[in-house]
């Protein structure tokens, strides 16, 4: 038995064989405030460091049915080609949980993320699939086990099992059983998030490959774990104190450090476009003028800005094209 399958057999110790006619679940997109960047185990998606995210109100809804001869996947109303990487990735994940090798699924999945937001995410997708499998097979798994299972689909999916602020503790075990999300008891209703689109075209290099190349070749990667630890500590402290200026400085520095490790990989990886740099300069200039606004970016060119509700009108006048996405607390 391969390693992933052996771990799944421990996460799902027994199955009754009973399946529902169908099962539906929703999972949110999450935005990392302290980033997951680099794996200590590529096969199990085990991270080098902890990470911290906040969930958005948008995400993926997935419904599962049993099918007769083959797996069928529909995404946003259209069938997904069997030859596509998306189909392959999903069915490889399903191979881990099929009650018998011949068991086949029909999966109907819908992203309510506005396409223009460029947020279509494997995290909410694998989390929604995991939650719907749990209902479909009536496993009744704990949130931690669901998070570990979703991680085997995509690392950051382990954070999308939960709403609100989520800490992904990296864990120390080789089998990853202690590497899962934890829902944090913080609420910050005044916190707002907006997206500034630089491009909605497919990224030139996947985040998995970018992470691997950065870990293997960037001379800056050695400082990443200590930077992350400091930024994460400050973020957790400021979630308590609601010191927005320190909170924003930490999350922005964390994103910029992550991108610096990519920029110094060999060959270099730069997701930034001209628009990305323009948005960043606009944010920094506005901050010099006294506006509390901070930026973060993931493995792509789009900029996410964080600000407080009291500054919303000012931020909207600065960025009329901003798409605000409510947080899910
Ligand atoms: C994050 N990213 O913390 C970081 C910041 C991208 C930049 O999690 O290979 O799609 O499936 O474990 O989860 C994207 O990585 O990678 C990611 P895999 P995943 O949000």
Image (cartoon, rainbow, N blue to C red):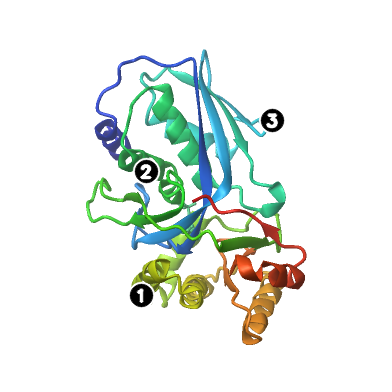
Q: CA distance from mark 1 to mark 3?
A: 45 Å
Task: Kindly indicate whether the residue at mark 2 contacts the one at mark 1 (C-beta within 8 angstroms).
Answer: no
Query: Label 1, on which residue?
Result: 230
Q: CA distance from mark 1 to mark 2?
A: 25 Å
Q: Is there any visible trace of residue 29 in the rendered image?
A: yes
Judging depth in this view, the residue of 188 and 271 nearest the camera is 188
Task: Kindly indicate whether the residue at mark 2 contacts the one at mark 3 (C-beta within 8 angstroms).
Answer: no
Tell me, for residue 256, which label it has, or none: none
Q: CA distance from mark 3 to mark 2?
A: 28 Å
Q: Measuring 56% from the left and 35% from the top, which residue is drawn there?
A: 61
Q: Measuring 40% from the left and 47% from the top, which residue is drawn there?
A: 158
Whichever of labels 1 and 2 marks the residue nearer the N terminus, that label is 2
Say few, some or many: other residues with alpha carbon within 10 Å of mark 1 (under 14 / 14 to 19 / 20 or more): few
Q: Is there any visible trace of residue 40 in the rendered image?
A: no
Whichever of labels 3 and 2 marks the residue nearer the N terminus, that label is 3
Tell me, for residue 78, which label it has, or none: 3
Looking at the picture, does residue 140 appear above or below residue 255?
Answer: above
Q: Is mark 3 within 8 Å of ligand 1?
A: no
Looking at the picture, does residue 230 appear above or below residue 5?
Answer: below
Q: Measuring 61% from the left and 52% from the top, which residue is drawn there?
A: 119
* Residue furthest left in the image: 173
Callout 2: SS: helix
């Amino acid at each position: 038995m391969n390693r992933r399958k052996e771990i799944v057999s421990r996460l799902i110790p027994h199955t009754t064989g009973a399946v529902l006619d169908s099962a539906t679940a929703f999972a949110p997109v999450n935005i990392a405030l302290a980033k997951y960047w680099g794996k200590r185990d590529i096969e199990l998606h085990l991270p080098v460091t902890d990470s911290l995210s906040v969930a958005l109100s948008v995400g993926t809804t997935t419904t599962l049915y049993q099918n007769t001869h083959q797996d069928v996947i529909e995404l946003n109303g259209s069938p997904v080609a069997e030859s596509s990487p998306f189909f392959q990735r999903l069915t490889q994940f399903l191979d881990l949980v099929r009650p018998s090798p011949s068991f086949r699924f029909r999966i109907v999945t819908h992203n309510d993320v506005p396409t223009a937001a460029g947020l279509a995410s494997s995290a909410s997708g694998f989390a929604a699939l995991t939650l719907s499998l749990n209902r479909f097979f009536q496993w009744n798994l704990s949130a931690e086990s669901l998070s570990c299972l979703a991680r085997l689909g995509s690392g950051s999916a382990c954070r999308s099992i939960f709403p609100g602020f989520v800490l992904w503790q990296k864990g120390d075990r080789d089998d990853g059983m202690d590497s899962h999300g934890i829902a944090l008891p913080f609420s910050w209703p005044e916190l707002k998030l907006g997206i500034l689109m630089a491009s909605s075209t497919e990224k030139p290099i996947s985040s998995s490959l970018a992470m691997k190349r950065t870990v293997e070749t960037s001379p800056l990667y050695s400082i990443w774990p200590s930077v992350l630890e400091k930024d994460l500590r400050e973020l957790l402290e400021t979630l308590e104190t609601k010191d927005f200026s320190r909170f924003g400085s930490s999350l922005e520095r964390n994103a910029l450090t992550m991108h610096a490790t990519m920029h110094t990989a060999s060959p270099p990886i730069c997701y930034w476009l001209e628009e990305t740099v323009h948005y960043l300069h606009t944010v920094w200039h506005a901050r010099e003028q006294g506006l509390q606004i901070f930026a973060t970016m993931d493995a792509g060119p789009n900029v996410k800005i964080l600000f407080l509700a009291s500054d919303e009108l000012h931020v909207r006048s600065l960025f009329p094209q901003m798409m605000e996405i409510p947080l899910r607390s």
